[in-house]
Amino acid sequence: MRELLEKAVRGERLTPEEGLKLFEEDLLELGRAADAVRRRLHPEGYVTFIRDRIINYTNVCVTYCKFCAFYRPPGHAEGYVRPKEEIFRKIDEMKKHGGTTVFLQGGHNPDLKIDYYEDLFGSVRERYPELYLHSLSASEIDHIATVSELSLEETLRRLNRAGLDSLPGGGAEMLVEEIREKVSPLKITAERWLEVHETAHLVGLESTATMVFGLGETNKQRIEHLEKLRSLQDRTGGFRSFIHWSLTPNETGMKRSLAPGGLEYLRILAIARLYLDNFPHVHSGWVTEGAKLAQVGLSFGASDLGSVLMEELVISATGVVYSYSADQIVRIIRGAGRVPAVRNSKYEILEVCA
C-alpha cells in the first residue's frame, strides 16, 4: 500500500483496481498522500474561493428525482419562472458584495425552450458585460436541446453566443446506471451526461465535475465514476475541478446508504485527489458537510473551498442551514494554516487575502 501511495504522489497513474484498494488504506495515510499531491500541483499554498450567487430561475421540473426536495411539477401552485427584473435585482445585490459569477440553475421546465435562454442570457450579458455565467447542468442542456428539437452541439453553440461561459457539474450524481435508475430514472443517462460535457468542451466551454455519494453505491462504483471523469478529461482537458458531497435526504423520502459523518467524505476526497491525476483542482465543500469538516478537508488534498454562496435553494430545500461570509471563509482557511485567495470561475487569482 505504501508503494501504491508513493506512486500516486509521484504523479503516476493509478489503475481502477489500485484505486479500489485505496478504500482499504488508513485514512490518515491517505490524507498525507493526497496533501502531498496538492502541494506538488499548487506549491504556492493558496486555498481559493469565489464570490458568486446561485439564482434558481425556475423550480418547475418533470424529472422527479427522488433525492430532490426543490422541484415542483408543472401546474403546481408553488411553481415559478422568475421574471428578468427579479434576476437583475439579485445580480445587483451580488455585485454589491464583490461577486463575479452567476450560476443560473433550474428544473426541466417543458415550457422553456432555447429562445427563453437566449433572451435571458443575452439580457444579462447586455446589462452586465463583465459578469461570468457559469450556468445550466448537463441535464438542463439535454432538456433544452430535446424540447427545442436541436442537437447538443447547436444548443451549446447558441447558448455560448448568447452569453454562457461554462457549465457546472450538476446532475452527475453517480455516473453508474444501476444507481441512476434507482434515484433519477427520468434524468439523462451517465453516457449522455458525459456526452454533454464532451460536446461543451469541444465547442470551447469548460466545466466542472461532481459526485454525490450515499446513494447506495459500492466503492467499485465510486471508482467507476472517477474513471469516467478521468477518461473524458484525457480526451478533452475541459474539466477545471472536481466537487463531491454527501446525499442530504431530509424532505426527500430517501435515506442515506451510510451513517452521517465525515470519515467517508474525507476518504473520497483524498482518493479523488490521488486518482484524478489530470484534474487541476479538488474542492472541499462546507455547504453540505459543515465548515469544520471542510477545513479538515484542506489537509486531504483540497485546494479550493468553493463559494461564499449568497443564495442556494436546491440543497437548502432539504433543511440544510448555512450562512458564511467571505470573512468567515478566510478565517477557516487561515485556521488550517493556508493562504486564502479570491478567484474567478477560471481559477485565476483576483486577490490574495493578506
Image: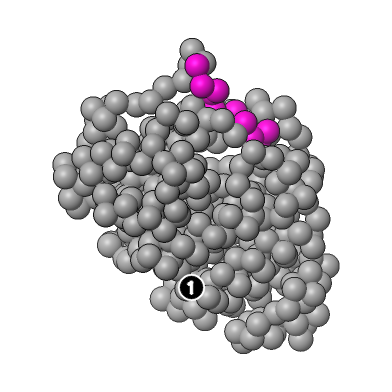
- Range of magenta residues: 64-75
Where 329 sits versus 317, above or below? below
- Kindly identify which residue carries mark 1: 236
**Residue at 60% across / 47% down in the picture?**
188
> Looking at this view, is 352 or 208 the one in front?
208
Quadrant for the N terminus, please.
Answer: bottom right
Q: Is residue 38 left or right of residue 324?
A: right
**Residue at 16% across / 42% down in the picture?**
127
Residue 13 at x, y percent in the picture: 65, 82
**Residue at 68% across / 61% down in the picture?**
225
Q: Is residue 70 magenta?
A: yes
Q: Is residue 72 magenta?
A: yes
**Residue at 23% across / 44% down in the picture?**
122
Residue 266 at x, y percent in the picture: 67, 58
Q: Secondary structure at mark 1?
A: helix
Outermost residue toward the top? 77
Q: What type of secondary structure mainly makes up the magenta span?
A: loop
Q: Amino acid at mark 1?
A: Thr
> Looking at this view, is 100 or 61 the one in front?
61
Q: Quadrant of residue 200?
A: bottom left
Q: Quadrant of residue 83?
A: top left
Whether residue 283 can be seen here: no
Total labels: the figure holds 1
